[in-house]
Image: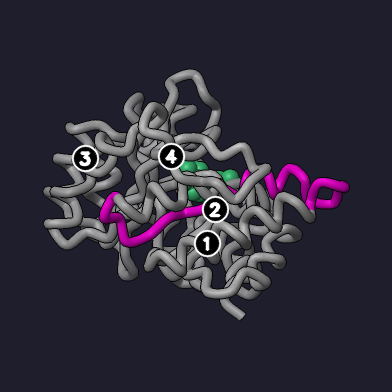
Amino acid sequence: MLLGVNIDHVATLRNARGGVEPDPVAAAALAEANGANSITAHLREDRRHIRDDDIYALVKNIKTSLNLEMAMDEKIRDIALKIKPRAICLVPERRQEVTTEGGLEIGGRWDGKTDECEAQDSDRGQFEKVRDFIRPLIDAGIEVSLFIDPDLTQVRAAANTGAQFIELHTGSYAEAFGTAAEESEFTKLKMAAQLAQSQGLKVNAGHALNYENVCRMHDIPGLVELNIGHSIISRAVFTGLGAAVKEMAELVCL
Ligand code: PXP
């Protein structure tokens, strides 16, 4: 598995003082030097952490590749088409949320109780909107990943959009880690990954992964990349960013 290090919170800290420190580009370089296989940054509509100038500077300076997280916003898509990151990850965004709270709703909802996971015509979620939004990105040679919950209906819908990747939202698994609910949340991830791969999708995962719960990601065959931010930046406060990334890279990229 590969490790994508999310540097949004370096920008959050910088913006708290309105100055230039700490610099997300310097953080990206340090992450790369300590084992990050790619750099992930989320250009939110409200620009609360990463800003346009950060994205331009990252593209110019990073040595690995950029995974740009973005919502279905045409202006941000124009930026992506201009800078051509290696990959974009499409995420839902709500202004008031603290972080990305759930996956994209591309198809109808699956109740988890039956094998029936075809979206109903009357409940097609945002399928057409997503499919049409990502087309120019795919045509430009950018890898497109859709951030979805481990829900079989969403996986099937994602497979029909033309996206090459999905990123499975690991938030519920992370929350359940160490509790009675862990096993069922883990199974959802595993089943979703398996279905996605059988439909020709490549599978990444991320959100709320940390130094403990990340280890079970090795038990999901074929995961390509994990995108991890908060736990690494939190540890970096105590150990330094280089050591925090190195330790995570050792757990992820066995
Ligand atoms: N993947 C996606 C799509 C995200 O939106 C986020 C949060 O920005 C992450 C991964 C990283 O999550 P965390 O900061 O909890 O590791």
Q: Secondary structure at mark 1?
A: strand
Q: Position of residue 20 (x, y in %)?
A: 37, 38
* Foreground pick, 149 / 155: 155
Amino acid type assigned to the residue bearing label 2 in the image: Gly
First in residue order: circle 2 vs circle 1: 2
- Whether disc 3's CB lies below 8 Å from ligand 1 is answered no
Q: Who comes first in sequence, dot 4 or dot 2? A: 4
Q: Which residue is mark 4?
A: 119
**Vertical placement of 148 versus 216: above or below?**
above
- Crowding near the residue tagged with mark 2, few <14, some 14–19, many ≥20 C-alpha atoms within 10 Å: many
Per the image, label 2 sits on a secondary structure element best described as strand
Q: Secondary structure at mark 4?
A: loop
Whether residue 79 appears in this view of the structure is yes
Q: Are circles 2 and 1 on residues that touch, CB within 8 Å?
A: yes
How far apart are the two marked residues, 1 and 3, measured between alpha carbons? 24 Å
Q: Which residue is mark 2?
A: 206
The residue beneath circle 3 is 133
Q: Is mark 2 within 8 Å of ligand 1?
A: yes
| Marks 4/1: CA–CA distance | 28 Å
Instruction: Write the start and end of the magenta stretch as one range.
Output: 161-182
* Residue at image mark 1: 226
Please tell me whether mark 4 or mark 2 is closer to you in this view. 4
Rendered residue at 52%/69% (across/down)? 223
Q: In the displayed structure, does residue 63 sit left or right of residue 28?
A: left
Q: Please report the residue visible at 29 percent of the width from the left and 50 percent of the height from the top.
A: 161
